[in-house]
Amino acid sequence: MERLEKRSTNRSGGAFLVNVFLLSLSMFFLAVCLTTTVDACNEAVCASIVSKCMITQSCKCDLKNCSCCKECFNCLNHLYSECCSCVENNVQEVDPMKDVVTLNCTVAYMSQCMSWNKCKGSCQSMGAASYRWFHDGCCQCIGDRCINYGINESR
């Protein structure tokens, strides 16, 4: 009798793993849908399945707590990634900010060209966030507000 109880425990554990897998899979597809930019709903492909899902209310989701993400994923089936924009489960682009912050990028070039190790040490000693050593021996120290390692040319 003890052996039967162990088997039933394993089955319920297996069912739990399957449920976790399905939930993870649906969350993955929801994330793909939310991060994919879709300009418009493809009505020719999605009209029928979306109508069914809207009638059954499978895709009336609260995206903050994902109250029905699994049901919506199951309802849209293999068309989920293509049709999720049709059920208003996608992220829209926001208007650009009116107050754009401008950051100044500070770079410093050493007056004399030097070895890679000396470039690294000199930039560290002046408090640079990063450095760039060019193959002609010139050294550029880069501030912490610079994007893409400062200026792309040796000076």
Image (cartoon, rainbow, N blue to C red):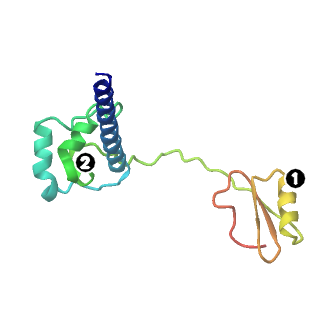
- Label annotation for residue 84: 2
Kind of residue at disc 1: Ser
Kind of residue at disc 2: Cys
Q: Quick one: 56 or 13, which is closer to the camera?
A: 13
Image spot of residue 143 (x, y percent): 74, 54
Quadrant that contains the N terminus: top left
Image-based side of 21 in relation to 125, left or right: left
Number of callouts in the render?
2
- Indicate which disc, 1 or 2, sits on the residue closer to the N terminus: 2
Q: Quick one: 73 or 98, which is closer to the camera?
A: 73
Other residues around mark 1 within 10 Å, as few (<14) / some (14–19) / many (≥20): few
Residue sitting at x 15%, y 35%: 57
Q: Quadrant of residue 40?
A: bottom left
Residue sitting at x 77%, y 76%: 135
3D distance between C-alphas at marks 1 and 2: 53 Å
Image spot of residue 107 (x, y percent): 76, 60
Image spot of residue 146 (x, y percent): 67, 56
Image-based side of 36 in relation to 136, left or right: left
Image-based side of 119 in relation to 55, left or right: right
Rendered position, 150 above or below 112: above
- Label annotation for residue 86: none
- Label annotation for residue 125: 1
Q: Residue furthest bottom?
A: 136
Q: Residue furthest top?
A: 1
Quadrant that contains the C terminus: bottom right
